[in-house]
Image: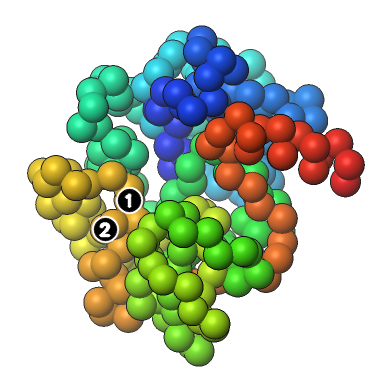
Amino acid sequence: MKAVILAGGQSKRLHPMTINEPKCLLEFEGRTMLSRYLDLLEAEKIDTTFVVTGFNHEAVKTEINSVKREMNIETILNTDFEKEDNHPIHGFFLTKNYLDDDFLLLNSDIYFTQDTLDKLIKNKNSCVAVDSQSLFIPGEMFVNYDSNMIVSDISKSLQQRSSGQGKSVQVVKILKEDSDALFERVEELCGQKNAFYPAQAYDVLIKKDKFFAFDINGEFSHELDTVEDYHSLREHLDNK
């Protein structure tokens, strides 16, 4: 199994902390977000991890090379990261020719547990981790699914419903058998104006009932998107 970490953004909503370095290099509990990801993935015996970089590519490479690991780690530079019409889905598309196995897709700004990753990997389907216990917040990425955990929709524009819904943890597993169809859809979306996130391409699997939700059911996860998120995560970790 392989893994992709999307770490190419400029993280402007976290300024001034990310003026000189991407948010994957922010430290919590004595290690950067990126190093923590790599530790989690190595513990799961992932063969190769591809880190898609952009802003301050060299700093990310230096961080990767600061620890010797058994896991193979390669960087893929998204040279267009500064363009206004370049988004995470474009960075993801750059990995197309490197993924010849089941793979994990991770944003570099989500704090999640080893247990969440372990259970996701053991899931037999292409799937996304969700938290059914998370408070519904309009504008956040949520997932609708049926009683068999088959996903019917994933979007930032969903309406709240009483069951069969959870917040996306943005940790995804894609089976090798599903990757060709997914990347064809990603390529199609990259040619359109409103393409932002890899999640927009999951519709090609959803239409075939081949994309599932895995409920972490309240297991801790935290997105690091704003200064408020940073302080909230630090407070949680300091008090756990």
Instruction: Locate residue 125, reporting x and y percent.
Output: 45, 72
Check contact, mark 1 vs mark 2: CB within 8 A. yes
Q: Secondary structure at mark 1?
A: helix
The residues bearing labels 1 and 2 have C-alpha atoms spaced at a distance of: 6 Å
Amino acid type shown at disc 2: Ala
Query: Mark 1 Cα within 10 Å, few/some/many (few <14, many 20+)?
Result: many
Q: Give the residue at mark 2.
A: 201
- Measuring from the top left, give residue 192's x and y in whole percent: 12, 46
| Residue at 54 percent of width and 82 percent of height | 162
Left or right of 115, for residue 139 = left
Image disc number at residue 35? none
Residue at image location 43% in from the left, 37% down from the top: 6
Position in image of residue 169 (x %, y %):
55, 56
Left or right of 168, for residue 66:
right
Residue at x 72%, y 39% (from the top left corner): 232
- The answer to whether residue 233 is seen in the rendering is yes
> Which residue is identified by label 1?
198
The amino acid beneath tag 1 is Pro
**Would you say residue 1 is visible in this rendering?**
no
Q: Secondary structure at mark 2?
A: helix
Front-most of residues 161 and 147:
161
Toward the bottom, the furthest residue is 147
Q: Nearer the viewer, residue 86 or 175?
A: 86
Mark 2 crowd level (few <14, some 14–19, many ≥20, 10 Å Cα): many
